[in-house]
Amino acid sequence: MKRNNQHALHKASKKGNSSRSATKFVAPRTVEEFFRMSKQDQDLWNDVVQIVTEVGKGTPLAAASRRFGRNPRIVRQLTTRVFYKGKDGRYHANTRHPLLRVLVIPTSKGLKEIGVRKGSQASLLGEYWNALHRYLETGDDSALNEFRGKQITDSNGEQIELLTAPEELDRLASTGVLSFESIYARAA
């Protein structure tokens, strides 16, 4: 995708704007494709995936799009075959559609960005982060114990074991790798 099309796409994605350039956008299928996108398009894709998740949980498409400052029509264009109109006249999301989500996972070497295609894997990783955050704040590792031996399967089929050993987590935390800010930041 050419640079000027990417900029036009970002502008078109904002609420109230429309442009045919959105139809030229190709959803990333791999982490490598995601990182070749402009920062603006990465932000757009992350918002789109979040909007799909919210609509899948029952939030109306217009409300979810508004929350992220995105045009619902553009969101639908970027995620063809994800949305369908129900008998109630509202858009619903096919949450089983394999949209790429780029997420951060702690490993013994630090944070690693991975792609996942299954919503169940993204949910598992989110629940793990919640348990990890609880451990870091309170020292209570009981919620982490539920993740012992569990793995995340990334978009390449690689299985990554969830880190639950308190000594490893403490080591990473002491180096600042697991600070609250870094949990949501890019690992690179």
Image: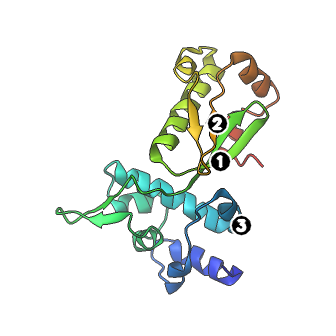
Q: Residue furthest bottom?
A: 20
Which numbered disc, 3 or 2, marks the residue closer to the eye? 2
Q: Residue furthest right?
A: 175
Residue at 52 percent of width and 59 percent of height: 47
Residue at 71 percent of width and 40 percent of height: 182
Q: Residues within 10 Å of mark 2 (few under 14, many from 20)?
A: some
Query: Which of the pair 128/8 is nearer the observer?
Result: 128
Compared across the picture, whether 70 is left or right of 101 comes to left
Q: Residues within 10 Å of mark 3 (few under 14, many from 20)?
A: few
Give the x, y percent position of residue 2: 69, 82
**Residue position marked by numbered label 2 in the rendering:** 160
Location of residue 110 by image quarter: top right
Type of amino acid at the residue the image marks with label 1: Ile
The label on residue 114 is 1
Give the x, y percent position of residue 11: 57, 76
Compared across the picture, whether 146 is left or right of 92 comes to right
Location of residue 166 by image quarter: top right
Q: Quadrant of the N terminus?
A: bottom right
Residue at 64 percent of width and 14 percent of height: 139
Q: Residue furthest left?
A: 87
Residue 8, placed above or below residue 158: below
Mark 3 residue element:
helix
Q: Residues within 10 Å of mark 1 (few under 14, many from 20)?
A: many
**Residue position marked by numbered label 3 in the rendering:** 36
Type of amino acid at the residue the image marks with label 3: Arg
Q: In terms of sequence position, does the residue under pointer 2 or pointer 1 come before the other?
A: 1
Query: Which of the pair 110/178 is nearer the observer?
Result: 110
Mark 1 residue element:
strand
Q: Are marks 2 and 1 in contact (CB under 8 Å)?
A: yes
Compared across the picture, whether 111 is left or right of 102 comes to right
Residue at 71 percent of width and 49 percent of height: 186
